[in-house]
Image (spheres, rainbow, N blue to C red):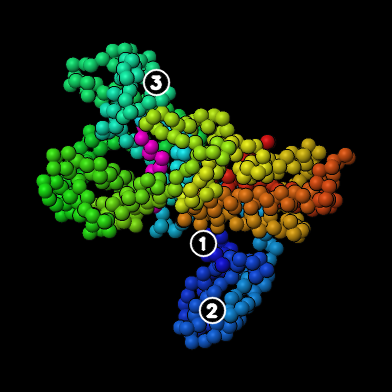
């Protein structure tokens, strides 16, 4: 059985009644822990509370289960309560639960599936993702972090948290000087070496800067302090141009950040790094050895102490990481980092830095995602950002669209390496999962349009006789629709977008079966569509099915919206 959060009001009521039954039976208090049975014939919900109370109550689980059943005030929505196995208490819902579900979906609309975690658990969550170096365009593999981080942020928001999407712009240090030097060489006809950045993006940025600032930009200025100063000055302008390019590309993917945090402006120019080092020193978490300043990270779970300031007085990159963590903690009370597998070593040191700064380590959540293998027709595609050998994300977006790029990443867990085959994702067929789900939504829209065009009057959902929905395909669709709030809550809690994506696929498949087996209207003359379907000759049954289809369309659209994938009306 799989544990499911109690966010459905019917389940919350049932939970309270089971607790009351324990008290009435003179049994110890316990959490019923309502669970979804793996097998449908075991009921809709079950509790193992009798098994867990056997030892403290000193009675057999089956005896305890019988006491629970005998003292349970069974609500009308439950049609059957039974005892199975060693002491499972199984509960099956009456049909009115499904009838109420349809009306609930119709009433809540786009809000169906959303919930509120308890007030004590609500957080202002800062979700940092992508954060690729602004020295070149995003390659298609970065789409994984963009899609996943954006959807996780949406899921957190849908469960009651305040969310800030943040991109850390690494626009300071030697790489920016080298980027500027590369731009200068391209603009002035100089020769690039292996260490320089190359590729079409460098040429485009150099041309953009020349068009905006003129050739004088690339000459050494009196205030430059030589060629290195010129490179740093040009690098700052080039990075901002590239950052804007990245921002535009992510926007085309439907990903918009609330904060673009500049390392140079937010940490170096404000003195935040020195302030952070001073605070860590005052806390007694820093010490001097061999002329350098170390942070006591080993005392907080890291494999060794980390250098904050080198012996020559320069702060380290880790010092900037500490300052950034401190800055984010001043703006949020839950920090979520989504990092690639090449950053695995950051986990313990960032957790340790948080502890040194007085930030509860459990409020710093770091998820490592496996990398993306880029393929074309099954063959690996080699890439090098420094050499300019990349397949840019915005180019793929322009070719196949945002949804096709997003969805393959969303349906895989972060601990799974993704093979992203450019030829496969571009295939517009039902074998492509995103098209399979979207087609279900478009099919529902087509069914409803057809009914409207034929003058069918569905009436109001509140007046429809939903008790007529007893066909197995109808019941399967109703059961699937009921699962969305629970799946959303679990996906948000576990940061697992794949749970919602797989749910959407299952719901789509359930509707496709309903479409094949149940018709809203009798077929029109010459209509050969779904020839094996049960025909709704009874207008009342047709109206009930119509509103069921409307509700299913809403549930599917809501699932896709939380994944930030579109729900087309036509395909």
Observer-side mark, 3 or 1, equals 3
Residue drawn 55% across the image and 57% down it: 486
Q: Mark 3 points at which residue?
A: 203
- Span colored in magenta: 123-134
Secondary structure under tag 1 reads: loop
Real-space Cα separation, disc 3 to disc 2, in angstroms: 71 Å
Disc with the residue nearer the chain's start (1 vs 2) = 1
Q: Quadrant of residue 48?
A: bottom right
At label 1, counting other C-alpha atoms closer than 10 Å, the crowd grade (few under 14, some 14-19, many 20 or more) is some
- Residue sitting nearer the eye, 79 or 300: 300
- Residue sitting nearer the eye, 301 or 535: 301
Observer-side mark, 3 or 2, equals 3
Secondary structure under tag 3 reads: helix
**Up/down of 359 relative to 440, above or below:** below
Residue drawn 34% across the image and 57% down it: 362
Residue drawn 73% across the image and 40% down it: 446
Q: In the visual, does 532 lie left or right of 153?
A: right
- Evaluate whether residue 160 shows in this view: no
- Residue sitting nearer the eye, 351 or 493: 351
Residue drawn 27% across the image and 58% down it: 301
Do the numbered discs 1 and 2 sit on residues whose CB atoms are within 8 Å?
Answer: no
Q: In the visual, does 517 lie left or right of 290?
A: right
Q: Name the residue under label 1.
A: 5
Q: Mark 2 points at which residue?
A: 50
């Amino acid at each position: 059985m799989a544990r499911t959060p109690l966010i459905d009001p019917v389940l919350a009521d049932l939970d309270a009644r089971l607790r009351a039954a324990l008290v009435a039976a003179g049994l110890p208090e316990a959490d019923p822990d309502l669970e979804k049975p793996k097998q449908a014939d075991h009921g809709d919900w079950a509790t193992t509370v009798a098994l867990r109370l056997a030892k403290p109550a000193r009675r057999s689980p089956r005896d305890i289960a019988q006491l629970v059943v005998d003292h349970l005030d069974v609500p009308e929505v439950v049609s059957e309560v039974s005892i199975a196995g060693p002491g499972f208490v199984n509960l099956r819902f009456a049909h009115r639960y499904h009838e109420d579900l349809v009306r609930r979906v119709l009433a809540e609309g786009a809000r169906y599936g959303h919930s509120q975690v308890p007030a004590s658990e609500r957080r202002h969550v800062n979700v940092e993702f992508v954060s690729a170096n602004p020295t070149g365009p995003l390659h298609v593999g970065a789409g994984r972090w963009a899609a996943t981080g954006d959807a996780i942020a949406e899921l957190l928001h849908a469960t009651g948290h305040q969310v800030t999407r943040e991109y850390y712009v690494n626009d300071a240090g030697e790489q920016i000087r080298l980027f500027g030097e590369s731009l200068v060489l391209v603009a002035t006809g100089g020769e690039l070496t292996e260490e320089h950045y190359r590729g079409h993006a460098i040429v485009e940025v150099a041309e953009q800067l020349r068009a905006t600032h003129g050739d004088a930009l690339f000459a050494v200025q009196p205030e430059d302090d030589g060629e290195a100063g010129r490179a740093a000055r040009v690098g700052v302008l080039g990075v901002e141009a590239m950052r804007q390019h990245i921002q535009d590309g992510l926007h085309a993917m439907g990903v918009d950040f609330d904060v673009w945090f500049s390392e140079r402006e937010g940490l170096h120019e404000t003195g935040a790094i020195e302030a952070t080092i001073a605070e860590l020193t005052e806390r007694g978490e820093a010490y001097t050895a061999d002329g350098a300043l170390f942070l006591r990270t080993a005392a907080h779970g890291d494999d060794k102490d980390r250098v904050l300031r080198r012996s020559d007085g320069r702060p380290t990159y880790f010092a900037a990481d500490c300052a950034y963590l401190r800055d984010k903690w001043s703006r949020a009370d839950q920090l979520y980092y989504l990092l690639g597998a090449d950053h695995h070593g950051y986990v313990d040191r960032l957790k340790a830095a948080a502890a040194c700064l007085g930030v509860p380590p459990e409020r710093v959540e770091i998820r490592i995602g496996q990398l993306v293998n880029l393929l074309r027709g099954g063959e690996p595609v080699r890439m090098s950002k420094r050499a300019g050998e990349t397949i840019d994300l915005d180019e793929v977006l322009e070719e196949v669209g945002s949804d096709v790029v997003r969805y393959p990443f969303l349906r895989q867990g972060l601990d799974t390496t993704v093979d992203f085959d450019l030829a496969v994702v571009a295939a517009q067929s039902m074998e492509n999962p995103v098209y399979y789900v979207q087609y279900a939504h478009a099919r529902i829209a087509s069914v409803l349009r057809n009914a409207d065009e034929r003058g069918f009057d569905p009436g109001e959902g509140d007046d429809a006789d939903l008790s007529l929905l007893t066909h197995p395909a109808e019941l399967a669709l109703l059961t699937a629709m009921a699962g969305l709030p629970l799946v959303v809550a679990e996906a948000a809690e576990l940061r697992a977008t794949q749970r919602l994506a797989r749910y959407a696929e299952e719901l789509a498949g359930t509707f496709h079966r309903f479409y094949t087996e149940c018709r809203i209207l009798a077929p029109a003359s010459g209509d050969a569509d779904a020839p094996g379907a049960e025909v709704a000759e009874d207008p009342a049954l047709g109206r009930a099915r119509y509103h069921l289809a409307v509700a299913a369309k809403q549930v599917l659209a809501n699932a896709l919206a939380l994944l930030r994938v579109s729900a087309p009306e036509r395909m």
